[in-house]
Image (cartoon, helix red, strand yellow):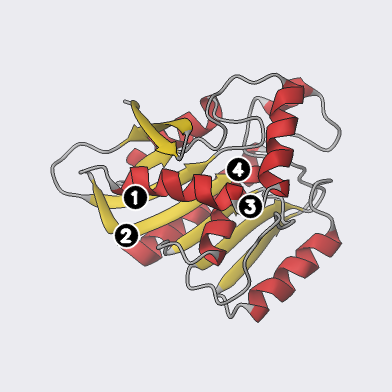
Amino acid sequence: MLQRIDYADGDASLTGWFAAPAGDRPVPGVLVAHEAPGVGPHVKAVAERLTGSGYAALALDLYGGEGFALEAAQALHRQMMETPGLMVRRARAGLAALQAQPQVDGARLAGIGFCQGGITVLELARDGAPLRAAIGFHPGLKRPAGSREGPIAAKVLMMVGDADPVVPAADRLAFARDMDAAGADWQLHLYGGVGHSFTNPAVDAMGYPGFAYEARAARRAWTTMLGLLAELFQ
């Protein structure tokens, strides 16, 4: 069952959604970063689903709310991308909220994200946050303003559709160069014929060209994520 967690970034009031498996022993914690539209049913369901594999999870809040209209969400996404340091600061506040939960082993942490959320967890890794892995599902690969240079200690796994209009081949090549320059242990999985937001069953109703749910790719990506988490934590 999800538990509401209220936390803050300076004057910004934020709300995360936390889930943990039953038991008294602290378990690894996974930070879940939302898509550009904000916190919604998809990332909340992911947080609950992770408990079935033995992880505690917090769906973070970058915006200070949920249920935004499209234009408002687009403006908030631009703010995250264009304001130096804002995305990573908000993400660090969410990570601190996850670490503060008694069910979480604060020394064993990972971050996963969807679309914008993939950028978010990668920025945490670039910023030196104590993540063992940064995992993105159909992430954008463009870097926000103020993105830091330097070594990346976390394992990096990004999973992208070959037909994703948000992530052209040039962005994938730039990502590879950045990861090599940072000395990262990185993977980029490419799913042939797959578009953007392929893990989200609700995306088809939006009717965006190049955005489509793909159940097979979603299953494969989830299994790949679990494999990396098991390598690190089990």
How far across and how far down the image is residue 90, in percent?
51, 44
Of circles 3 and 4, which is in front?
3
Mark 3 neighbour density, 10 Å: few (under 14) some (14–19) many (20 or more): many
Of circles 1 and 3, which is in front?
3
Q: Is residue 52 visible?
A: no
Mark 1 neighbour density, 10 Å: few (under 14) some (14–19) many (20 or more): many
Mark 4 neighbour density, 10 Å: few (under 14) some (14–19) many (20 or more): many
- Evaluate if marks 3 and 2 touch, with contact meaning CB atoms under 8 Å apart: no
Q: Residue at x 52, y 29 (%)?
A: 64
Q: Is residue 201 above or below residue 86?
A: above
Q: Is residue 154 above or below residue 221?
A: below
Judge by depth and name the residue closer to the eye, 119 or 215: 119
Label 3 to label 4: alpha-carbon separation: 18 Å
Q: SS class of the residue under badge 1?
A: strand
Q: Which residue is mark 3?
A: 119
| Residue type indicated by callout 4 | Ala
| Residue type indicated by callout 2 | Arg
Q: Which residue is mark 2?
A: 108
Q: Which mark is residue 218?
A: 4
| Residue type indicated by callout 3 | Ile
- Evaluate if marks 1 and 2 touch, with contact meaning CB atoms under 8 Å apart: yes
- Please report whichever mark, 2 or 4, sits nearer to the chain's N-terminal start: 2
Q: Which residue is mark 1?
A: 29
Label 2 to label 4: alpha-carbon separation: 25 Å
* The quarter of the displayed image where residue 71 is located: top right
